[in-house]
Amino acid sequence: MIAETVCSAVSAAGLGIALITAYRKRFLAATRIAAYSLVPIGLVMTGVVEWLADTAFSPMAWAGFGVLGLAWVLFTTTRVVERRRGGTRKERRAARAAAQPEAAAPAASAPSLSQGQGSGPATRPATAPRRDDDFSDIEAILKKHGI
């Protein structure tokens, strides 16, 4: 009974503030305030406030909230530990499997480059694209500054 009266008073006060705000020609804000002020009376009309009042004085309900809070803490703790370790075991295994072929690939490609006819012709084509990349970076910087 008291909760319904308080919710009604809060709604009435909110609607009064919304009217004052609308009088000042701030219609968007007034509409938003009116929407917020209608929530408490809507909760009273649907019976949620009565249910909450009954729940607030129930020791079994509070024990249930405690169990839910403990579950949330456990979930959060495991997620923090997973992030510090770098994901779940499955994700770490997949990352290690993906990293191993990459480590073996440069070792396999290095002998093929050195099998060419000496170091001269094999290294010149490798350096030419690097110079082009360096010039493209310089060009991008110059274009950025309008030069």
Image (tube, grey):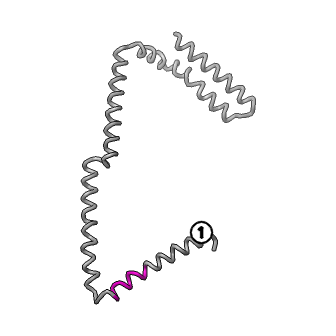
> Which quadrant of the structure image shows residue 147?
bottom right
Judged from this view, the residue extending furthest toward the right is 24
Magenta residue check for 99: no
Q: Which residue is mark 1?
A: 144
Q: Specify few, some or many for label 1: CA neighbours under 10 Å numbering under 14, 14-19, or 20 or more.
A: few
Residue 97 percent across, percent down from the top left: 24, 59
Report how many numbered discs are placed on residues in the image.
Answer: 1
Q: Is residue 32 above or below residue 107?
A: above
Stretch in magenta: 120-129
Q: Is residue 109 above or below residue 97?
A: below
- What residue appears at the point 31 percent right and 86 percent down from the top-left corner? 119
Q: Nearer the viewer, residue 2 or 96?
A: 96
Q: Nearer the viewer, residue 57 or 136?
A: 136
Residue 11 percent across, percent down from the top left: 60, 20
- What residue appears at the point 63 percent right and 27 percent down from the top-left corner? 34
> Which quadrant of the structure image shows residue 7?
top right
Element class at badge 1:
helix
Judged from this view, the residue extending furthest toward the top is 1
Residue 86 percent across, percent down from the top left: 32, 49
Residue 4 percent across, percent down from the top left: 54, 14
> Which quadrant of the structure image shows residue 70?
top left
- What residue appears at the point 30 percent right and 47 percent down from the top-left corner? 85
Q: Nearer the viewer, residue 147 or 39?
A: 147
- What residue appears at the point 25 percent right and 84 percent down from the top-left corner? 115
Q: Nearer the viewer, residue 8 or 100?
A: 100
Q: Specify whether 92 is left or right of 50.
A: left
In terms of secondary structure, what is the magenta stretch mainly? helix
Q: Specify whether 23 is left or right of 97.
A: right
Q: Is residue 136 above or below residue 82?
A: below
Amino acid at pointer 1: Lys
